[in-house]
Image (tube, helix red, strand yellow):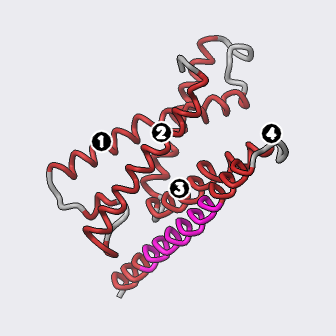
Amino acid sequence: MKHPRSWNRVMAMSIVFVTSMYIVTGVAGYLCYGENVKSPILDSLPKGIISLAAYILITLHVILAAPIYLCSFAIEQERRLGIDRSHMSTTKEFICRVTFRVCVVVILTLIAMFLPYFSDLMGLFGAVSGALVVFLIPVTCHYKLFGWRHRTLFQHLSAFVIVSVGIAGLILGTSSSVQELMTSIQKGDSATSSISH
């Protein structure tokens, strides 16, 4: 950033903006479809050019965002495996690095294609990791780094509210994801038993 001191303001504005988008989408979905709204909301929308465009944009988002996480993972694992120029020649390092990264992508693709109930499992992992990464871990790390003392009452109350929202989101998101997973498993079992009969 050009002005590092603006970091807190930029983060606050980003969080407010993203949260506002989620709230508008959630409220509109429930007002329009009630209890029958599906997750993701796109599954509730009528098929057409708008929903197709939304699916294309979401797919592009995932494809473009995935390398950020995959590169971080790959770099860490390559360091552990000794895939660098201090342990091997430039050519060998390049070949090992490319081979390792291709293997990671192939394994993840196979998991996504063949793991049963993959979408529901991703919802469960997302519910747990989202609440931890966004709400609980930052507050825990903040107190671990700076301690409990020399904090204003407002800072302690803010931390309490953030942790409370995180715990509520963790409980609600996890229970909802587990219910969806169980429903999918039951549907899968009933479909299997009907086919076998």
> Residue 151 magenta-drawn?
no
**Residue type indicated by callout 4:** Phe
- CA separation in Å, label 1 and label 3: 20 Å
**Residue type indicated by callout 2:** Ser
- Residue 134: image tag: none
User: Label 1 crowding class (10 Å Cα cut-off): few <14, some 14-19, many 20+?
Assistant: few
Which segment did they paint magenta? 164-186
Q: In which quarter of the image is residue 48?
A: bottom left
Q: Which residue is disc 1 drawn over?
A: 57
Residue farthest top in this picture: 90
Relative image position of residue 59 (x, y in whole percent): 34, 43
Up the image or down, 170 lies above or below 17; here it is below
Judged by depth in the image, the label closer to the viewer, 2 or 1, is 2
Q: Nearer the viewer, residue 157 or 26?
A: 157
Element marked by disc 1: helix
User: Which label's residue is closer to the chain start, 1 or 3?
Assistant: 1
Q: Which residue is disc 3 drawn over?
A: 126
- CA separation in Å, label 2 and label 1: 20 Å
Residue farthest bottom in this picture: 197
User: Which label's residue is closer to the chain start, 4 or 2?
Assistant: 2
Element marked by disc 3: helix
Q: Which of 4 and 116 is in front in this view?
A: 4
Q: Which residue is disc 2 drawn over?
A: 14
User: Label 3 crowding class (10 Å Cα cut-off): few <14, some 14-19, many 20+?
Assistant: some
| Image point (54%, 59%), residue name | 127
Residue 161 as seen in the image, left or right of residue 45: right
| Image point (30%, 42%), residue name | 57
